[in-house]
Image (cartoon, helix red, strand yellow):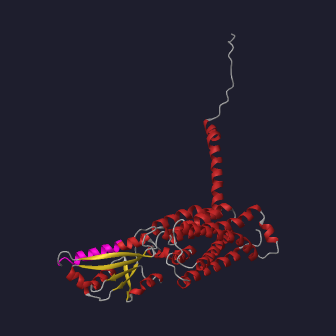
Amino acid sequence: MILPWVETRLVVSLPKKNYFCCQILNPLKQLLSFVHKEFMHIWRDKRTILVVIGLPIMQMILFGFAISTEIRNVRFGVFNPKKDEVSLKLVEHFNNNNYFTYTEDITDPNHFTDYFKKNKVDMILVFEDNFEYKLTHQGKAHIQVLTDGIDPNSSTAIANYANQIILKYQQENMIQAPCGVFIVPQIKMLYNPQMKSAFNFVPGVMGLVLTIICAMMTAVSIVREKERGSIEVLLVSPMKPIYIMISKMLPYLVISAFIMLLIILLSIFMLGVPMAGSYFTFCLISLIFVIAMLAMGLLISTMVENQVIAMLISGMGLMMPTALLSGMIFPVDNMPWLLRVISAIIPARWFISAVRKIMIEGLDFVYIYKEFIILCFMTFILLIISLKKFKIRLE
């Protein structure tokens, strides 16, 4: 019997298990191996880890604790000619408040501004003569509240707090008094009676701009030499490391001086911020601060190997602490003690404080010698550390 022709085909089929391994598991293993390799590269780069993880932590801490609209630790002095019972009770009422601390008993009304210039007080209460007699017999007595108007936000907050305390004292202690008996507070803000915000922000912006620009310029300059390989030429030259650093700083010092000139001209002629003090003193403190920031940039350049990390550290790494902890926006006295300690090592804090005293208050060098000495010390330390960490040999 002859069977009909049957066309047969050879079908090769792989087992389902082998097909799953070839089409899914193997590509997945390759993908995971590449992901693992990238994780290892990132983990080996400690500076990248520090930037990626450290910056968010620093931002949360700074924004969480430094940003505060509350006014704390307000030091106040009192001018009270008669020291009668009512005025003394009102002063005690202020001192018992958590926001105010009594520090000065003022006897000479002609030296009110000296207490602000020497940073002894944040507010002065001035009782008029015969305060209690006028309050009980005439139904009205005046008390003047003097604040430092350089920071209009803080001054306004202090004045509002003082008004609330006076009103509360009057409500608690004048219940049995005849109708119409009340205390009239008179607010006066020294140095900035118009409450212009530019008086407060312009010195802070000066410090912030110079911090970022100066540090970034010198930080990128040496790192650029490393990336291009031209650093080898500098290292084999007969120049000493200190001369290399000075040669890197001087051009940027001239550029920074030009930037400083532009900033001060814009501040005076466009923003209306006065220069009440000495131009020489202002230029001297600015020069020290610029050199300190250039040295900061050199220090950053000795620790990193590429321009991106240098710009991140000199830009974001310095911008936020300077903006939040230098007193540019928020008063340093309102911060927790740990942040106050950290703010003390930020050069911009002392520069901004000195510029406000020179430009707005018109103070002489005698009143900013503390800021000047601190900035000189910081500049010296930064230069020494930068010189020590400058590598004279390629690794």
Asked if residue 252 lies left or right of residue 194, the reply is right
Q: Does the stretch in magenta take in 174?
A: yes
**Is residue 250 in view from this perspective?**
yes
Residue at position x 29%, y 79% in the image: 142
Snapshot quadrant of residue 244:
bottom right
Asked if residue 367 lies left or right of residue 238, the reply is left
- When the figure is inspected, residue 5 is found, relative to residue 228, above or below; the finding is above
- Percent coordinates x, y for residue 394 in the rendering: 77, 69
- When the figure is inspected, residue 263 is found, relative to residue 136, above or below; the finding is above
**Is residue 321 in view from this perspective?**
no
Asked if residue 201 lies left or right of residue 252, the reply is left
State whether the magenta stretch is mostly helix, strand or loop: helix
Please state which of residues 278 and 174 is positioned toward the viewer in this rendering.
278
Q: Which residues are magenta?
A: 160-176
Please state which of residues 52 and 288 is positioned toward the viewer in this rendering.
288
Q: How many marks?
A: 0
Q: Does the stretch in magenta take in 111?
A: no
Please state which of residues 201 and 273 is positioned toward the viewer in this rendering.
273
- Percent coordinates x, y for residue 160 in the rendering: 35, 71
Snapshot quadrant of residue 91:
bottom left
Considering the image in quadrants, where does the C terminus appear?
A: bottom right
Extreme residue toward the top, this view: 1
Extreme residue toward the front, this view: 269
- Percent coordinates x, y for residue 225 in the rendering: 74, 65
- When the figure is inspected, residue 45 is found, relative to residue 24, above or below; the finding is below
